Amino acid sequence: MKAVAAGLTALLVAASLPALAQTQTQNRLAGAAERLSQADVNSLTDLRITLIKSALQLTPDQEKLWPPIEDAIRSRAQDREQRVDATVGLAEARRDRGIVESMRNRNPIDFMHRRADNLTQRAEDLNKLADAWQPLYRTLTPEQKKRMGALAVLVIRDLRTPGEQIQLQGQDEDTD
């Protein structure tokens, strides 16, 4: 009788794990579905740009050096949204196939290539942003540099979007 009870318990636990995994995946995707619209993303990018410019209180000569920075910020935001959209698309495809099928057919090599491509794109965008900032940074006063440093900490911390969080969680699943 104890063996039958233990067997049934093991069966119930084994049967509930895929259901639990499916629920967790659906919860993550529900968060992604509530992502901001492109107009909202553009508005947030505009607000970030306005915040940075306001905090720095640029002089008229410094304002002349601003356009490449704004272009780099906008380009970086656009590239980030494209990466997030691709990640959400992969997550939705996994959901549509089902967790069991996705686990059976996952390819860690493809995952590593996708991750490397994403990291390469992020590095390129960050280098472009740094290059765009360099001429203006040379002209900033010590007080402006302090304000820029404080802003940089806030911006870097908040760079991850919900889609990137899903991607990071998906990486954990892909490396299991």
Image: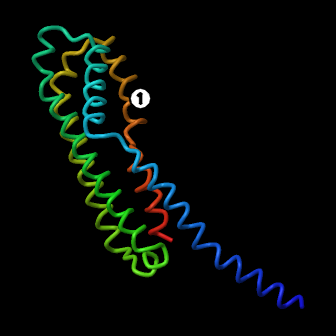
Image side of residue 147 versus residue 127, left or right: right
Residue at position x 39%, y 43% from top?
Answer: 160
Image side of residue 61 versus residue 78, left or right: left
Image side of residue 74 versus residue 160, left or right: left
In which quarter of the view is residue 54 placed? top left
Q: Position of residue 149 (x, y in %)?
A: 36, 24
Image side of residue 89 versus residue 132, left or right: right
Few, some or many residues within 10 Å of mark 1 (<14, 14–19, 20+)? few
Residue at position x 48%, y 66% from top?
Answer: 173
Q: Position of residue 77 (x, y in %)?
A: 25, 39
Return the residue found at the far right: 1
Q: Position of residue 12 (x, y in %)?
A: 71, 78
Is the image coloured rainbow, by chain, by secondary structure, or in one colour?
Answer: rainbow
Which of 98/53 is in front? 98
In which quarter of the view is residue 104 placed? bottom left
Residue at position x 50%, y 61% from top?
Answer: 25
Quadrant of the rendering where the N terminus is positioned: bottom right
Q: Position of residue 82 (x, y in %)?
A: 24, 50
The residue carrying mark 1 is 154
Q: Amino acid at mark 1?
A: Leu
Which of 64/106 is in front? 106
Residue at position x 40%, y 56% from top?
Answer: 167
